[in-house]
Amino acid sequence: MKHPVTRRRRAQALIGIVAVTALAATACGGGGGGSKKKYSPSNKAVTEVVNQSPKKGGTLKLVSSDKFDSLDPGDMYYASAWNFSRLMARPLLTFKPAPGNASYEFAPDLATDVGKTDDGGKTWTYHLRKGVKYEDGTEVKAADVKYAVERTFDKEILPNGPAYFTQYLDPDGAYKGPYKDSAPDKLGLNAIETPDDYTIVFKMKEPFADFNYLAALPQTAPVPPAKDTGKEYVKHPLATGAYMVDGQYEPGKAVNLIRNPHWDPSTDPLRKALPDRIELLEKQDANDVDNRLFAGTAQLDVVGTGVQAAAQNKILTDEKLAANSDDAVSGALAYLAISSKTPPFDNVHCRRAVQYAVNKAQMQRAVGGEVGADIATNLMPPTLAGSKVADMYPNGAKHTGDVAKAKDELKQCGKPDGFSTVLTARSNRPKEVAGATSVQNALAKVGIKIEIRQYPSGDYFTQFAGVPKWVADNKVGIMFMQWGPDFPTQFGFFQQIVDGRAIKPAGGTNLSELNDPAVNGLIDQATRTIDQNASAAIWQQLDQKVMESAVMVPFAWTKSLLYRPPNVTNLVVTPAYSGMYDYLNIGIQ
Amino acid sequence: MTAPIETTGVAREAHPEAIAESAGVRIEGRSLGQIAWARFRRDKVAMAGGVVIIFMILVAIFAPVITSFVGGDPAEYHDDLLDPVLNIPNGSFGGASWDHPLGLEPVNGRDIFSRIVYGARISMLVAFLATLLSVVIGVVLGTVAGYFGGWVDALISRAMDVFLAFPLLLFAIAIGSSLQGEAFGMKGDTLRVTVLIFVIGFFSWPYIARIVRGQTLSLREREFVEAARSLGATDRHIIFKELLPNLVGPILVYSTLLIPTNILFEAALSYLGVGVQEPTASWGGMLARATSRYEDAPMFMVVPGVTIFITVLAFNLLGDGLRDALDPRSR
């Protein structure tokens, strides 16, 4: 029986067969990747400033797969935003645009010199450069810096930035910020004094050795009280740097920067101010960003955390691309936070069993393989001053897990047959999800059954893993975590993740809820110690103490594979900003 | 007596089949089902679809047996077979070999064949049970609405409009991400599969209910129903004995066409991360992870993609064939 429907359906079936064959052919064409010749990233920008050139002019095109948390210097927490902000804003201090450890050195920016203390770290004094002007031509005064710091106290208006100034200048929380200030000039914070227009003094009750790092936060970039528009200031922050916002910033879309006519190079030894115009497009597709860099239609990926997996393999199998790429150490640690409260992990031996059982080689693969990370065996990243590498829980020659030792710890914990627990990871981070299956796979070998639950990263700390009550209610045992220090010191690295006093009802980053008086004491002791060698020894002791308690399973010190198009000048990797390129002086040929 | 002779003569005249039979030709009365089956068997394309589906169902049922011969445990890592720098399988065709015929995943090195075979279980289970759920709800409510009419019909029809207007995908994502952990006394994959079945099934019943309602509306006015009613048959008798047998055709056809829609929906939800969770394999989940690696590990994306394609195509061909066979006028 021949009828039209059968004929039509026969055609469908035929089209189907053709489509399948075509797809299969595509697969064949793309095969053989694993046997290609491989090239290592040149890493040139890690050790020197690449493509040095004083050539001015041109338009620098930047792209981002994400968006800045804010463009208001008082309201930003992303390292990329801090790095970028310096094109427009001048904080008291900043970091030297130099390779390697030299980038940790302070470069006085708005201030004439690094801060000085004469009472062991309680009082810090800075002197401002004369003749620094805003884009509207008015001169910067010390009171503007004080006002800029004050406004960061109001977390309702500016929720994003770090809260170190509040924590150290006003530990009792008495000052509520200039928007609620009863003083007529809105400068009611007594802990900051401005004896004259060019001097600013910070006074604290307890000594704080790392204060210069706070002065290098974008939060110290001056804001004139008369021009502050609160939440709206993000659209057009008043520039003191070489560039100013052209029109308005559209968050999540674009911002264009043009030259600041009142910027005077004689007051600024740092900025070269090469391009005439800088354009940034936000929220672009991540794989598309990489392809635009390869094609040269964009000069830099502002996010600075490296290319995607597909582009990574393109670079590693292409000699030319590899020659223009850098595998930069980010300074961040990826680890598993083990709850110290959820049974049976309230027993240290059950936590140690996990330390021995995990397969760190597989987890390194999950974060991008040898190019994506170095295997971590202790907490402090080796790039930080005063770090020492140690391995308290050796788990095999290739870190693939030591089943015998893990089982032994389980016996001591009273759970020789294992147990079940819950593991959380961030659903929109494929590397974490891949790592989670690896943990599940490895722990199953010693009888620990893992149930993986995924949550969006935007709410991970405010609603899930960062909420102790939620962790307890859901019997969560292990949480994926990645931590990059706010500033490149041992204090910046450790304080928020191991200090018992950093545990918050929500939004905390001490996920293990470790509250060990010995650990807390060591942190206090180290912050008071000005001598660098003495404080390094204390931090090493602290690292060991935390590892003994086994509440964190460090597995990767992450790296970012960065690509620099050959026509971009003065590129250097800055460890001070999580191992991305320094954005201060880049130009285009 | 002449009667026996007479009777034989009358019988001969009254039953022409008997004449034919005596001449060596046998003619049988055929039911509607038999006619349809005969028509269906002549439709080679639809038969091929049916064979593929039966094959997929067998694969899903015997997944552990099949993978014990080829592929192995779907959750096992074969990371020794991956390139240590590029994180993709050594060799061509995604690392295909006799042990791993469809190659290995990048990063983890799990066997793709095993994961496809186990993924068939999730796809088939969710698609069939969700379809069953929507068919049961749809047939009951559709028949009731069509047969009783009046305010019952008005109420059920409005309910259908509400369900059809529901932003199903958003709802599924919301419920899928909020129902993690434990709920309704279930947890893990059991919970997630149940939620998938419920969400997909509970929101696709109006499609089948509308068709059943329309058919019932026209059937209830037909002579055989009126005859039954005038003989004093109860509503129950009319619905079950007179209406439903005549509805089997359309119900069967639309269920067959609903299954591939549900397979795709399950894949879409797994793709969006609200389906079953790792390490349980699902086709949509495999596709989701493969999209970022299509340039350097194309096999990882092609295999689940082609599998979904073939399965959905097979169901659609079968459904079309069934429709032609059961109701040739709808051509």
Image (cartoon, grey):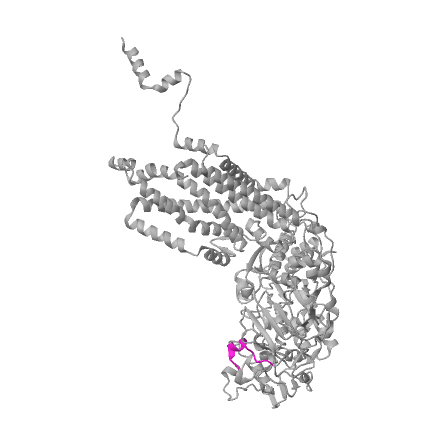
Residue A368 percent location from the top left of the image: 67, 59
Residue B115 against residue A129 in the figure, above or below: above
- The quarter of the rendered structure image containing the N terminus of chain A is top left
- Residue A451 versus residue B15: which sits nearer the camera? B15
Is B124 in the magenta?
Answer: no
Task: Answer with the quarter of the image where residue A203 lies.
Answer: bottom right
* Residue A208 appears in the figure: no
Residue B147 percent location from the top left of the image: 31, 44
* Residue A285 appears in the figure: yes
Residue A181 percent location from the top left of the image: 51, 85
Is residue A362 found left or right of B23 in the rendered image?
right
Residue A190 percent location from the top left of the image: 57, 87
- Residue A489 versus residue B246: which sits nearer the camera? B246
Give the total number of marks visible in the rendering.
0
- Residue B96 versus residue A276: which sits nearer the camera? A276
- The quarter of the rendered structure image containing the C terminus of chain A is bottom right
Q: Residue furthest top?
A: B1
Q: Residue furthest bottom?
A: A196
Residue B215 against residue A249 in the figure, above or below: above
Residue A62 against residue B59 in the figure, above or below: below
Magenta residue span? A228-239
Residue at x 56%, y 64% (from the top left corner): A457
- Residue A142 versus residue A280: which sits nearer the camera? A280
Task: Answer with the quarter of the image where residue A461 lies.
Answer: bottom right
Residue B67 against residue A167 in the figure, above or below: above
